[in-house]
Structures are given as C-alpha cells and as structure tokens.
Amino acid sequence: MVIAGDMLCADQNFDIAQVLRFFRSKPGELAIYYELEQGEKSSSRGIVEVCPETHRLTCFLEKPQEGMTTSRLASVVFYCIRKGTLHYLSDFLTLQPKAQDRTFGRFWEWLINEEKLPVYGMKLPTGFQLIGQVELSDYTKWLGHYSALRQESPANPITCFSYARVGLMGNPSDGFNGKTIAMTISNFWAEVTLVESQTLVLLPHPLNDPTEFGSLQDLYCISRKEGYLGGLRLLQATCKKFYQFCSMKGIALTKQNFTLKYDTNIPRQVGLAGSSAIVSATLKCLMKFYNITDSDLPKPIRANFILNVETDELFITAGLQDRVVQVYEGLIYMDFSKNLMDEQGFGDYISMDMSSLPLFWLAYLSDPSDSGRIHSNVRQRWLNGETEVVEAMRSFAELTDQARIALQGSDWNRLAQLMDENFELRRSVYTDECLGPGNLKMVQLARQFGSAVKLPGSGGAVVGLCLDQGRLVEMRKAFQEAGCVFCVIVPYNPAGSIGINRQD
C-alpha cells in the first residue's frame, strides 16, 4: 500500500479495511480516486476514466490539458499493488532516466495506458488535503482543524420525503415489459430522518411496528388490520442493500453510524406505493449522509435498486413503475419494452408537463386486504406465453401511448375514456374474483356519477377523472357512506408549479 506522506483525508472516519477488502476482491492493482469539487481544475491532478461496470481504469491522464477528457475523477497517491507487479517499477525507472519524469502519476499512466495492466478504481466520497512539506506540528495543526470543524458544525438531522403515487394509465404492465404513466401526489408521503450516532440504530414506528399491546384482543385487531410487517424491515433491507451496492461498486463508505426513524401517512395495503416510498426516502438519506452522488447512483439505477430491496430482500410482489416515479417525481411516462430492459437494464423515463392537469380524485377502502394478492397467477401465465395475457400487456402499452397524446393535447374526454378501457382490460385478465368485491364496488359507485375510474395500483384504491366537477361533492358523500376515504388529488410537482411541495 502506497499513501502520500503529505496527504490527509478530510474525514477521520475513513475505513481503510474496506479498501483492502475491495483490493483483495479484484484481479489487479487498486487506485483510489475522488470526484473533483466545483472549481477544482483537472490539470492539477491525475485524472482517471473508469468503466462503470467493471470499475477498471480505462485511462490515466497525468495533469491533462483542458479538453483532453471529460472525466472529473481524480486519482490521489493512494494505491494498493500486488507483489507480482513490483518489478514494473524497475522497468519504468529504466525507461525514465530523468528524475522529473519519475513520478507515481507517470508510472500509472504508463502502466494503464501502455502496458494495459488491470488496475481497478475505488471511489472515496470525501475530500483530501495536500499539505505539502510537513513536520509533525503540521499534522497536529490540521488534525486540530478538522476536530474544531466537527465541534463547530455538529451533525444536523437529514430528513427526506418520498410521495405516494397513482398509476394513471398502463398499470400493471410495468412488470410485463409494458408502458405506464404515473404521478406522485402531495396528499400522502413517507418521511425518513437520519442523524449521526455512536451506534447504528433503527427505531421502530410506534404504530406500524408495535411491540406492546393493551390486550390480546388489541393485538388481534391490530394484526388483522395492519398485518405483521411494518416499516422497520424496509429500513433494514435498504441499509443492507446500500452497503452491498457500495461495496460492489467500489465506493468506500466512512465509518459513521446513524439512527434512522420513519413516519408515513400513506394508507397501507391500498396500492399507493407506501412500502417503496419508505425505501426511497431511506435511500435519499443514506446518499446524503455518505455523500453519494447522482453519478454514483443514477436515477434509473436507483429505481432498480429500490425494486431489488423489495423483491430480492423482502419478496414483495412489485414492478418498476412505483420506484421510477418516486425517484423522478412528477408526471412520468415509462416505457419498459423488453429490448430497452435487455440493452440498458432499465426503460425510457420521460417527465411530462403538469401545468394544466385536470382534477383527479382518489378513494380507498378503510379496511383493505393485502394489495399484493391481486397479482394472482397472471405473471406465470405471461411467462408461459399465454396469448390472452401477452396481448393484454401489449394493449396496456398502446393505451398508455394514446393517453400520453391525450395529456399533451389536454383532451380530457379521451383520457377519461382510456382510463375506463384500462380498467376493463385489467378486469378481463385478472377476473372479478381476483379483483375482489371491494375494488369492484368502488368502480361501480364512481360510474354512477359519470366518472372515469381505474385502479391506481395493485388494489384497495381507485383513481378517477370526473369531468362534471359539480358532482364531486355528491360523489364524495356516497363514497364516505360506503365506508371509503375520498379526497381530491393534489399532484406533487418537483418543479413546484403545482400542488403542495414539501422540502426534501
């Protein structure tokens, strides 16, 4: 291991053991790099280009002139070298008789660009301070400086939000290489707070993760309505997957612990993406805490990450739609075509204009069943190539493209017609038995008032578009009398031009 003697890491929680573990997992050398700060010139550093899939350094440029590379990843004198590679040092010194050319930067430039030796990169999400010619007093001074900064700036809590969503068109084809349009709404959200602490603590929610009950009957009633699985498992699974992701991607995390807690007002088990909202908000907190950037975890990959937390770790039946719209936020058109998913690992996601949306409404069952059950055996039928299911998913995609045109042209009559068609197509594939009497009752009730209506998610709620807004009050009363909760949707627009936008 080679570390420059005049370099201090700006984070005393630096985990050198994680660097060694990553080095031992790779069949080559290791170079540490970081992302240049804004205003920092690439001509003052050794710049590396890194393959995002393999983490192998594809190019090393020692203090390149402007325009030679677009990379903002800077190597520092922090390397791990295998014993069998040390003879290259002698070879390099023989090739460079002039002392000014015998630098580590030139050595790595030669080793990577000319000798094509496999060298891998690991990113540190922190800063470095090069303090030049130093003595012990200089190190003491800088360490004191860092300590004073930490005392002057105690860790502030990090709070992030993620919003419920309604599927306006195409769902549930997102899990079947289809297309959908969905929208985040300000009516309901999940909130996660992270604060630095001595040990890592996950705080249970007093209502969603109960451990004490007033009586056995109380336990029975709560378990019957809420089930057995609260949000604590979502926090834990997200943290586990986050550490695994960073380790695999060569991102060294600092040795800092934290306390996580969550709250949510998203109704449970009604298909409004409540679980993924908690995962999404938790991931936002972790990224901020560890200084993980969008380039480290791009939005399309972030949506895949959230889905994997739920499907791989917790075996929750889910598709990509909810995770995409909660990552991008707003009104999102999503194309999950097989060729796109196979070629790039994610679909095409396009933000749509929200400035002139019609008034949508939402109603949900006050005592729902588990919304995940509504998926039934359709996936297996699709995997088996059953013509009815395959054609239905193709039709969902076509409806979505037509709905996109209707939204762009403010053709609300056409949009309402497409919403009804979306529900009837879903009904034909999933059957009334699978949809359940509660969902069918809400659809029938909405249609009595001339409203378009469909399921916004996997079941337990309906979303509607009533072009005769004069009937909304009457319809609200009818839903409430039927034991449902009814509200007018307030879209969440990340641009802030419509709806009630919370501060992330």
Image (spheres, grey):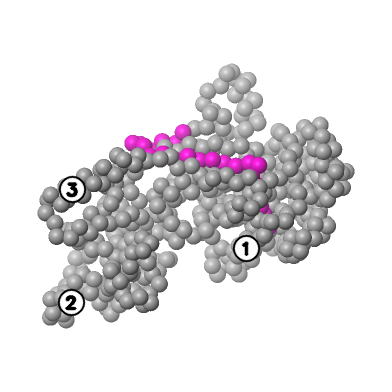
Residue matched to label 2: 101
Residue type, mark 1 in image: Ile
Choose top left, top right, bottom left or bottom right for residue 41: bottom left
Choose top left, top right, bottom left or bottom right for residue 336: bottom right
Residue type, mark 2 in image: Asp
Q: Residue furthest top?
A: 215
Choose top left, top right, bottom left or bottom right for residue 67: bottom left
Residue at 40% across, 72% down: 70
For numbered disc 2, what is the local secondary structure?
helix
Looking at the image, which is closer to me, 353 or 226?
A: 353
Q: Considering the whole magenta stretch, tell me its main secondary structure.
A: strand
Label 2, label 1: how far apart the Cα atoms are: 50 Å
Using residue 427 as the reference point, say whether residue 12 is left or right of it: left
Specify few, some or many for label 2: CA neighbours under 10 Å numbering under 14, 14-19, or 20 or more. some
Residue 421 higher or lower than 340, as above or below: above
Looking at the image, which is closer to me, 434 or 318?
A: 318
Reply yes or no: does residue 194 show up in magenta. yes
The quarter of the picture where the N terminus appears is: bottom left
Using residue 76 as the reference point, say whether residue 282 is left or right of it: right
> Which stretch did the figure color magenta?
181-203
Using residue 65 as the reference point, say whether residue 276 is left or right of it: right
Residue 2, horizontal then vertical, whole percent: 20, 61
Kindly identify which numbered label has been placed on residue 350.
1
